[in-house]
């Protein structure tokens, strides 16, 4: 993870799709943080986007008739562990 601003970061990792693994970078931003009212744990939420080319993962049927570029929308909440 590389911080790009006060509430933004680039998160890079490996994505495996259709048996092919490639590096992907998600441009993420902080949604918020605080104490979860249900379990009283410190929680932080992020969401982000990444664009992949499905043909890079071997999913190339009907390219170029069907678009090759796919936008992934990802959201997550993380709790601090003791």
Image: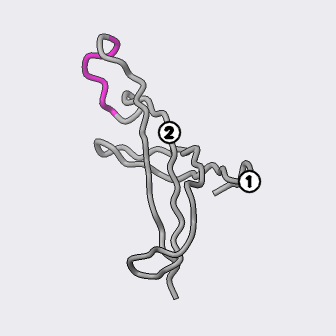
Q: Position of residue 75 (x, y in %)?
A: 44, 52
Numbered badge on residue 35: none
Distance between the alpha carbons at the discs numbered 2 and 1: 20 Å
Q: Nearer the viewer, residue 37 or 48?
A: 37
Residue found at x 56% / y 71%: 34
Q: Within 10 angstroms of label 2, few (less than 14), some, or many (20 or more) residues? A: some
In the image, residue 54 sits, relative to residue 18, either above or below, namely above
Q: Mark 1 falls on what kind of element?
A: loop
Residue found at x 54% / y 66%: 44
Residue found at x 26% / y 16%: 62
Q: Is residue 11 magenta?
A: no
State the extent of the magenta-drawn residues as a range: 58-64
The image quadrant where one finds the N terminus is bottom right
Residue found at x 43% / y 48%: 74
In the image, residue 33 sits, relative to residue 67, either above or below, namely below
The overriding secondary structure of the stretch rendered in magenta is: loop
The image quarter in which residue 52 lies: top left
Side (left or right) of 63 relative to 12: left
Looking at the image, the residue that sits furthest to the right is 5
Q: Within 10 angstroms of label 1, few (less than 14), some, or many (20 or more) residues? A: few
Q: Mark 2 falls on what kind of element?
A: strand
Colour scheme in use: one colour
Q: Position of residue 47 (x, y in %)?
A: 50, 50
Q: Nearer the viewer, residue 42 or 59?
A: 42
Q: Position of residue 76 (x, y in %)?
A: 44, 58
In the image, residue 31 sits, relative to residue 80, either above or below, namely above
Looking at the image, the residue that sits furthest to the bottom is 82
Q: Earlier in the sequence, mark 2 or mark 1?
A: 1
Task: State the residue position of label 1.
Answer: 6
Looking at the image, the residue that sits furthest to the top is 65
Q: Position of residue 24 (x, y in %)?
A: 51, 44
Task: State the residue position of label 2.
Answer: 50
């Amino acid at each position: 993870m590389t911080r790009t601003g006060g509430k933004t970061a680039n998160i890079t990792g490996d994505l495996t799709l259709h048996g092919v693994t490639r590096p992907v970078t998600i441009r993420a931003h902080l949604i918020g943080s605080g104490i979860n009212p249900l379990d009283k744990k410190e929680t932080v939420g992020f969401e982000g986007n990444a664009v992949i080319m499905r043909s890079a993962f071997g999913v190339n049927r009907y390219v170029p008739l069907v678009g090759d570029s796919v936008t992934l929308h990802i959201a997550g909440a993380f709790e601090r562990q003791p």
